[in-house]
């Protein structure tokens, strides 16, 4: 027999599905293959990594991530690197935060 708890309470159960253990390089290759062949989307992967995200929340987070990455990273041949201004900024910040008379 089912009983209703409340009209204002939402109850959600997250069941983690047990997946076989796979090494990281194989997992990356499989994920890339699925992305390249449109078997999954970036949104699907985000939800897989964080099942509590709704599709809309995943889309919003993707837009935030994209804006951050475009500001701070240069992507060449699939490899992300800091922008030149950010590389210099990190060094400059470390000198500015250094106490006078100290050597780091």
Image (spheres, rainbow, N blue to C red):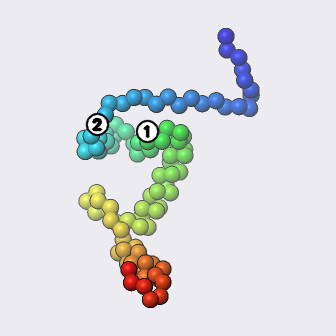
Label 2, residues with CA under 10 Å away: few <14, some 14-19, many ≥20: few
Asked whether 17 or 70 is in front, the reply is 17
Apparent side of residue 9 relative to residue 15 in the rendered image (left or right): right
Tell me which corner region of the image, top left, top right, bottom left or bottom right, holds residue 72. bottom left
Which of the numbered marks, if any, corresponds to residue 103? none
Apparent side of residue 83 relative to residue 14 in the rendered image (left or right): left
Residue at left offset 71%, top offset 31%: 9
Q: Is residue 41 above or below residue 11?
A: below
Tell me which corner region of the image, top left, top right, bottom left or bottom right, holds residue 19. top left
Can residue 85 be seen? no
Direction bottom: furthest residue: 101
The N terminus sits in image quarter: top right
Residue 69 lies, in percent from the top left, at 42, 62
Apparent side of residue 74 relative to residue 9 in the rendered image (left or right): left
Residue at left offset 43%, top offset 85%: 102
Residue 6 lies, in percent from the top left, at 74, 26
Residue 25 lies, in percent from the top left, at 25, 45
Query: Which mark sits nearer the N-terminus, 1 or 2?
Result: 2
Asked whether 81 or 90 is in front, the reply is 90
Residue at left offset 43%, top offset 39%: 48
Residue at left offset 37%, top offset 39%: 40
Q: Which residue is mark 1?
A: 48
Asked whether 46 or 63 is in front, the reply is 46
Which of the numbered marks, if any, corresponds to residue 22? 2
Can residue 12 be seen? yes
């Amino acid at each position: 027999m089912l009983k209703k708890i409340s009209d204002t309470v939402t109850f959600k159960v997250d069941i983690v599905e047990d997946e076989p253990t796979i090494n990281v390089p194989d997992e990356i290759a499989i994920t890339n293959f699925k992305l390249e062949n449109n078997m999954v989307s970036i949104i699907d992967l985000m939800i897989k990594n964080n099942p509590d995200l709704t599709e809309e929340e995943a889309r919003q987070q993707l837009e935030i991530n994209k804006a951050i990455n475009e500001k701070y990273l240069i992507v060449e041949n699939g490899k992300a690197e800091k922008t030149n201004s950010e590389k210099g900024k990190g060094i400059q910040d470390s000198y500015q935060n250094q106490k006078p008379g100290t050597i780091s």
